[in-house]
Image: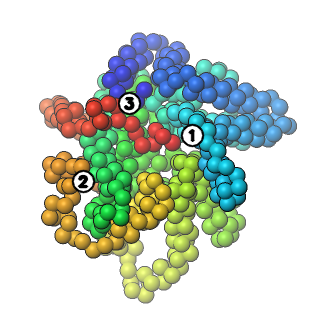
Amino acid sequence: MSFISFAFLIFLPVAVLVNLIIPIRYRYIWMLIVSLGFYATAGIGAAVVLVVSMLSVYGAALCMDRYVARAKQILIACIVFNLGILFVFKYLNFFFRILGIASFGAIEDIRFNLIMPLGLSFYILKSVGYLIDVYRGDFVPEKNFLKFALFISFFPQIIAGPIERAGNMFKQFDNPAPVDFDRFRNGLYQMLWGYFLKLVVAERLAIFVKTVFDTDPELGIRGAVSYMAIALYTFEIYADFAGYSHIAIGVARIMGIDVMKNFESPYLAMSVAEFWRRWHISLSSWLRDYLYIPLGGNRKGTIRRCLNIIIVFVVSGLWHGADFTFLVWGLMHGVYQVIGKILTPARDKLMKVFNIGRSSFSHRVVKTAVTFVLVAYAWVFFRADSIGRAITIIKNSLYFTPWKYVDGTLYQYGLTRGSFLLGGFGVILIIVVDMFNNRGVVIREKILEQGLWLRWAILITGIVVTVVCGIWGPGYDAADFIYKQF
C-alpha cells in the first residue's frame, strides 16, 4: 500500500480513529496490527520474510543478554543471517554478474527471478542497529515481542524510513504522546507539505527528467537541456524522498509517535561532508555510528580516515542499489570528501593570503554553489541506466547553449510551458522554505501561529493545489516513491 493511494486514504483515518479510542497502555498492540496489515498488502511472501527476520533478531538479542560470554558469536551469526537475506533478494544477480565479468564470460550470467520485499534494506539496517546497541550494552533487549515487532514494522517507516533507533522508539511505545488537536494539526500540515512535494513537484519534474535521460543522448540533447535535466533531477529526488519523509513523520505524529527528521536543507550545504549531515540523516548517522566509527573513524591517521570514508560511501552506494552506477555514485561522494580533506590546508592558506572571510556572503555562496554542482553531477550516475549513459549525459551538459533557456526549447520535453513553470515555482518554494529552515524558522510552525482565517486559507489552498495540480501517475494510478525500490 502506497501513501499515495485511495486505499491509504481509507486506511489512515480508521487507524488514527481507533488509535485515539484505545487506552494508551494498549495502543502499541493496535499500532502493530495496523502496521502488519499495512505491510501485508505487499504480499504474503514479503510478510513471511519480515516475520522471519524479526524472530531471528528478537531471539538473538535475548540470547546475547543471557549468554554474555557468547554474545559476539550470536551477534555475528544473526547479522550474517539477516544480511544474507538482503544479499539473496537484492545482490545475488549482481554478484553473478560480477563473476561473469571477472571470468571474462567463463561463468555464465545467471539470473534469478526474485522480487525484493518492500522496505527490506531499511528494516534490515534497523535490525542490525538494534542488535549492535544490545551487544554494546546501550539498550536492554525488549522482552515484549509485540513491542519489538512494532519497532521493526511501524508502518510509517517500514517502506523507506527514517531508520529509527531503539532508544527513541521503545520509550514512546510505552508512553505514546496524547494526540490533541495541536498535535494532529501539526502532523496534518506536515503531511500536506509532503504530498505537495511528491505530487506537484517531484512527479512533474520526473516527466522532463525521464524524457531527457531515457532519450538516446546521441540524438542531440545537449547543452542547456541536458544540464536542466540534471538540475531538475537533483530537486526531483529531493522532493520525492523528502516528501515521503514528511508524510511518514506526519502520520507517525498523529499516531502519537515522534520520528526523527530526515532532511535539513541539504542543498544549502557548503561542503559534501555537510551535505551528508543534512541529507537522509537517519542513514548517514547510521553509517557513522555502526560502520565509520567501528572502522576507526578519524582516530587512526589521515590515510586510514580517508580509506574509512571511501568504504562507508561505497557501502552507501551499494545499499541504494545493486548496480555499478550506484557504486560509482557512492564512490564519487567518498572521493569528494577525501579530496576536500587533502586540500583543506591549501584552501586555508589561499584564504589567508587573499584575506577571504569564511563567514562572508560571497564565500558562502560560492561554496554552496560548488557543492550543489558536485552533488548534482553525482546524481546522474544514480539516475542513469548505465555508466556509459551517465558519462554521455554529463558530457552533453557541458555544451554552451544558453539561448535554449529562453527560446522555448525546454517546453518540448514532456511538459507544457505552464506545467514547466509550475515545477519551477515548486523548486523555488523548496529553496525558500529551506532557507528559512536553515535560519531556524519552521514555516509550518509559523503558519500554526497565525489567525484562524489565514491558517484555513493556507490549508485549503494547499489541498486544492495538491489535488488539482498533482500528477498521480499514468492513468491516475498511485505514484511510487523513488526510495521505495531500495
Q: Residue at x 52, y 54 (%)?
A: 326
In this view, the residue in front, 92 or 341, is 92
- Crowding around mark 3 (Cα neighbors within 10 Å: few <14, some 14 to 19, many 20+) is many
Residue 3, label in figure: 3
Residue type indicated by callout 2 = Tyr
Q: Are marks 2 and 3 in contact (CB under 8 Å)?
A: no
Does residue 353 appear left or right of residue 292 in this picture? left
Residue 413, label in figure: 2
Q: Residue at x 30, y 65 (%)?
A: 220
Going from N to C along the chain, the mark reached first, 2 or 3, is: 3
Q: Which residue is mark 1?
A: 121
Residue type indicated by callout 1 = Ser
Residue 347, x across and y down, in percent: 47, 79
Q: Residue at x 67, y 71 (%)?
A: 303
In this view, the residue in front, 24 or 272, is 272
Going from N to C along the chain, the mark reached first, 2 or 1, is: 1
